[in-house]
Image: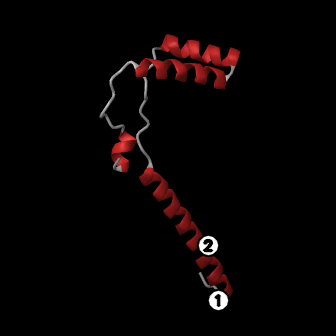
Amino acid sequence: MKANGKDYQKYSDAIDQIQQGNDAMIDLFNEMEDDTELIGFDQNVVDQIEKAKIKFGDDAVNEKINTVVREMLSWLDLEGVNSKDEESDGS
């Protein structure tokens, strides 16, 4: 294919933009982490949560579940245990 200087520059710029887009996509791919469930709810519990969210709204149900779980976790001795985030941060 023949091209003049102006056409050559257009194609060169387009290729550069594609390359930059590919680099950004590769960076996103490399930064991905496995999506593992934090809590494995039984299907019955999942169904009840979905119904509650329909009736009371996402925020209200999320707040109630967080309150219950926070209280339950306060009963456990977790002193000296680091979370994955704390370990990766060097905390």
Nearer to us: label 1 or label 2: 2
* Residue pictured at 46% horizontal, 58% vertical: 27
- Residue 56: x and y in percent read 69, 17
- Disc 1 element: helix
Residue 53: image quadrant is: top right
- Residue 41: x and y in percent read 46, 18
User: Label 1: which residue?
Assistant: 5
Which of marks 2 and 1 precedes in the sequence?
1
- Residue 15: x and y in percent read 57, 72
Q: Is residue 70 above or below residue 9?
A: above
Residue 67: image quadrant is: top right
Q: Nearer the viewer, residue 80 or 9?
A: 80
* Picture quarter with the N terminus: bottom right
Q: Is residue 74 above or below residue 79?
A: above
* Residue pictured at 44% horizontal, 52% vertical: 31
Q: Nearer the viewer, residue 34 or 65?
A: 65
Please name the colour scheme applied to the rendered image.
Answer: secondary structure
Q: Is residue 33 above or below residue 66?
A: below
* Residue pictured at 61% horizontal, 85% vertical: 2
* Three-letter code for the amino acid on which mark 1 is drawn: Gly
What is the residue that sits farthest to the left in this orientation? 80
User: Label 2: which residue?
Assistant: 14
- Residue 26: x and y in percent read 46, 58
- Disc 2 element: helix
**Left or right side of 9 for 89:** left
**Left or right side of 54 for 72:** left
1 and 2 marks in contact (CB < 8 Å):
no
* Three-letter code for the amino acid on which mark 2 is drawn: Ala
For the residue carrying disc 2, how many other residues have a C-alpha within 10 Å: few (<14), some (14-19), or many (20+)? few
Marker disc for residue 91: none
Q: Nearer the viewer, residue 43 or 57?
A: 57
* Residue pictured at 56% horizontal, 14% vertical: 47
